[in-house]
Image (spheres, rainbow, N blue to C red):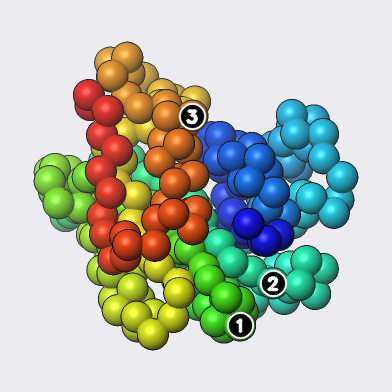
Amino acid sequence: MQENVAVVTGGTGGLGRALIPYLIRRDFRVAATYLKPEEASKLEEELDLDEDRLMLRRCDCTDLEAVEEVMTDVVETFGTINVVAALVGGWAGGRDLAETSRVRFERMIDLNLRATFNALRTAIPHMRDAEWGRIIAIGSRAASDNPAGQAVFNASKAAVASLVQSLAGELDDTNITANVLVPAVIDTPATRSALPFADYMDWPKPSEIAVVLDFLLSPASEVINGAQIPVFGKA
């Protein structure tokens, strides 16, 4: 496979840190965004890669102009963008709809829908110039199960799925595919902290989900487009 470039938003999170080594093994050059400098330093130590293989950029992915700057920087430095893994997202705790503040509502929309939109909106023009591309975003089983007490989170993830599936149709005339990975709960430190009394033994681990991501972001996945891929584990 020719040398290719992947952008991983939220690359220093649990899922990003599990995915990036797979991309490196496929000879990708990788650009990853982060917010916390200590997480970026940890990733650099874990991978021990030269700057021509790994680019780390601090970026608030809810800011369209900031994401656009990162994508432009990636193309100017690495020459192209073939893969986008839009991994930024979050859960701000459960609240009944009548108790959900505007701040909490906007936070869920920003983290899940806006951050995904920003990554895809700014990357697609560059990806169309490449010979092939792969897009993956993160949905949630809650978007279809609609558990009570977290309506805004459920709605924001349903919007992500709709956004990406619509995009898949727009890209029918290209060699770019767009799919949504749908976890139940991912076993990360942040999730354990948010749900301290949950039984996490059956939650899928980032390393297990990264195997699925690795395939979806590879040339071999060309027949999968506009799909929602469940990765529930036993949760």
Q: Which residue is mark 1?
A: 129
Using the image, tell me which numbered label, if any, was put on residue 120.
none
Q: Give percent across and percent down for residue 205.
A: 42, 26
Which secondary structure lies at badge 3? helix
Which secondary structure lies at badge 1? loop
Residue 214 as seen in the image, left or right of residue 25: left
Q: Residue at x 39, y 85 (%)?
A: 173
Residue nearest the viewer, comparing 101 with 116:
116
Q: Give the mark, 2 or 3, whose residue is nearer the N terminus.
A: 2
Q: CA distance from mark 3 to mark 1?
A: 31 Å
Q: Give percent across and percent down for residue 63.
A: 58, 70
Q: Which residue is mark 2?
A: 80
Residue 78 as seen in the image, left or right of residue 6: right
Q: Give the mark, 1 or 2, whose residue is nearer the N terminus.
A: 2
Q: Residue at x 61, y 83 (%)?
A: 129
Q: Is residue 204 above or below residue 214?
A: above
Q: Classify the position of the C terminus by image quarter.
A: top left
Residue 183 as seen in the image, left or right of residue 31: left
Q: Pick out the residue farthest to the front.
A: 1
- Quadrant location of residue 8? bottom right
Q: Are marks 1 and 2 in contact (CB under 8 Å)?
A: yes
Residue 226 as seen in the image, left or right of residue 6: left
Q: Residues within 10 Å of mark 2 (few under 14, many from 20)?
A: many
Q: Give percent across and percent down for residue 9.
A: 58, 55
Q: Which residue is mark 3?
A: 207
Residue type at mark 3 is: Ser
Q: Residue at x 46, y 32 (%)?
A: 206
Residue type at mark 1 is: Asp
Q: CA distance from mark 1 to mark 2?
A: 8 Å
Q: Give the mark, 3 or 1, whose residue is nearer the N terminus.
A: 1
Residue type at mark 2 is: Thr
> Looking at the image, can residue 105 be seen?
no
